[in-house]
Structure formats: C-alpha cells, structure tokens
Image (cartoon, grey):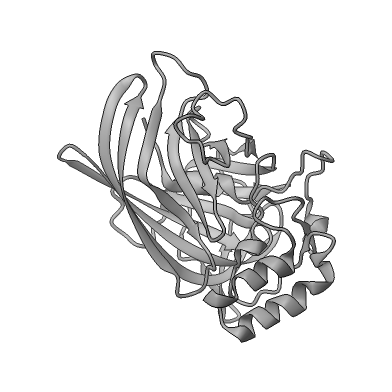
Amino acid sequence: MRLFVFLIVLLLAACGDPVDDRVITPDDMGDVDMGSDDGINNVNNTNNSNNSNNSNNANNTNNANNSNNANNGLCSPNNDGTIERSEVPLRAGLNAKFKIALDADFDTAGVEENGETVWDLSGDFAGDMLELVELQDTMGAWWLSTFPNASYSTKLSATEDLRGVFQITDDALLLQGVVTPEDGLGRTELEYDPPVTVLQFPLTADSTWQTETDISGVALGVPSFYDEVYTYTAAGTGTLKTPFGDFQVQRVRVDLERTIGILTTTTRTYLFVTECFGTVASVVSEENEDEVEFTTASEIRRLAP
C-alpha cells in the first residue's frame, strides 16, 4: 500500500457545488462561492469567532474586505498573508478537476521574478491525467461506525482506490483514517490515533505544527500497526501558475516519517494554499528524498479548468 502525503490536496481545492451543478471557472476568480460550508455561517461570523486567536488589526482588515460579500456567501481574496478557516471551502459534495503527472521533473525551489518566487505548473507534463476529485458525504458509508465524527471522504491517489476519512473542525482539517470503498475480507480500515492535523488555521508565514500518530486496523485484510510523524512548516510565499490560473499562495512543506517495524521511510510534500480555493497544487517527492528542495517528483497535482 503506497500512501503519500499528496492526499492533502484532494480535500481543499474543491470548487464545484452539487446543489446547482456549478463548477468554478477561471472567470470566477474574483469572488468564489463558499456555498453552505458546514464550518461557515457567513464570513463575518467566522472571522469574529477567531478574534481571540488573531490580532484586532488582522480581523478588522478581514472583516472590512469581506463584509460586502458576507451575506451572499462569497469569498473575496484579500491577500493579507493570513488564510483563515472562513477562506477555505470545506464540505461534503464539493468537487474540482486536477491535472496529475507521475514521476515528473520539477524544481520545487521555483524561480525569482521581480522580487518574488514563482512556481510554474501551468504547462503539460508527460503522461498528464485529468481527474475529478470529489468530497463524498459519509451517509451510508460502511465504515461510519468507526469514524462517527467524519465530515467526508475522498480518494487519496490517482493509482489506488483507497479513501481518506476527514473531519472538519472550527480551526483544523483532520485525517481520521484510511478505508477501501467497500467492506469485505480484503478491506482496508486504518484508524489514526490521534487524527493527523492536515491543515491548521489560521495559516500564516510562521505556521508550524506536528502530529505523531499510531495507526492500527487492517490493510487489505491484514492486521497492521505502524507509526507516522507529520511535520508541517510554512515554506514561503509567491505566485503559483496552474492550468486554472495564477494564484498568490502560501507554500507548506510536509515531512512524513513512517515507521513499520524497524523500517523507516520518509516523504516530502509541498502544498500550495490560497485564499478561497484552498490547496490548489501539491508536489510529492520520491521516497527518502535527501534534499529539502527537490527536482524529481513522484506526483505533481494542480488545479485545472
């Protein structure tokens, strides 16, 4: 079973709304419809609830920029350097398209242009695939008794059917476990104790957090027990170019250390997170990559129209 940290990108940049069967296009980049996000009553209420964790000036800026759109559920990027929970669409039923390339060359360091870092993922890579990523409701899921607090599940990779089970909270997105789509003797049902904090809000240029988790259950019908350590570190800001469009992003480096018995493997992932769209791209290293900035990726995933 080959699980990578790139699963994180599948949960966030989800722009379609099943209620009106609308998918956000590049023409919508000024204001993004946040819909009936379970974590958002409206933009102002969510920002106000975070006042105890953020400076008054930061909240005043957010409220001023978002107040005109609060009542109609729109999110307008203010590029203030802080990504609030209210600025990330998270709820079951959302979907988005991603272009995915496996075993591709890309320099994660980016290039400097006019005093800022630019990462260009707008072009084509050999073997590109277009995949629709959907955040599915938990109703009727065979694994729901194991994860009663789950908010949604989503497919983890382009090459396997395994699904991640996620919980949305007021200030974080949590990975609770990994399951197969169907129950049975060959099922996978792995529980993370504690759940992995996939994203922590507010996200700023100084953000860093870590989760050490014990994983237990069955993998393809075989009892399994192992440990993982996820370390998240803010890793710069700049412009990300994707097939969907250009975004002002905060980059997050995710270092995963997995220990099974006496064998430890490491994987490094870069996430590109932006206001109103969430994670719009990810670049995943090969296993046991030595360099912090690498040039060979096991997977590249970016938002596409």
Q: Quadrant of residue 140?
A: top right
Residue at coordinates 47% horizontally, 35% vertically from top-left? 147
| Residue toward you, 76 or 263 | 76
Q: x, y percentage for residue 300?
A: 52, 47
- Left or right: 44 in relation to 69: left
The residue depicted at 62 percent of the width and 39 percent of the height is: 135
Is residue 299 visible to us here? no
Q: Work out which residue is located at the far left of the displayed protein and give it.
A: 262
Q: Is residue 237 above or below residue 305?
A: below
Residues 141 and 229: in front is 141
Residue found at x 57% / y 59%: 170
Q: Find the residue positioned furthest to the bottom.
A: 57
Q: Is residue 12 left or right of residue 179?
A: right
- x and y, in percent, of residue 195 in the image: 40, 47
Q: Position of residue 10 (x, y in %)?
A: 56, 44
In the displayed structure, 171 sits above or below 302; it is below
In the rendered view of the protein, which quadrant contains the N terminus?
top left
Position of residue 276 measured from the top left corner of the image (x, y, whole percent):
69, 61
Left or right, residue 44 beside residue 220: right
Q: Nearer the viewer, residue 119 or 257?
A: 257
User: Who's the residue at 41% across and 20% down the image?
Assistant: 187
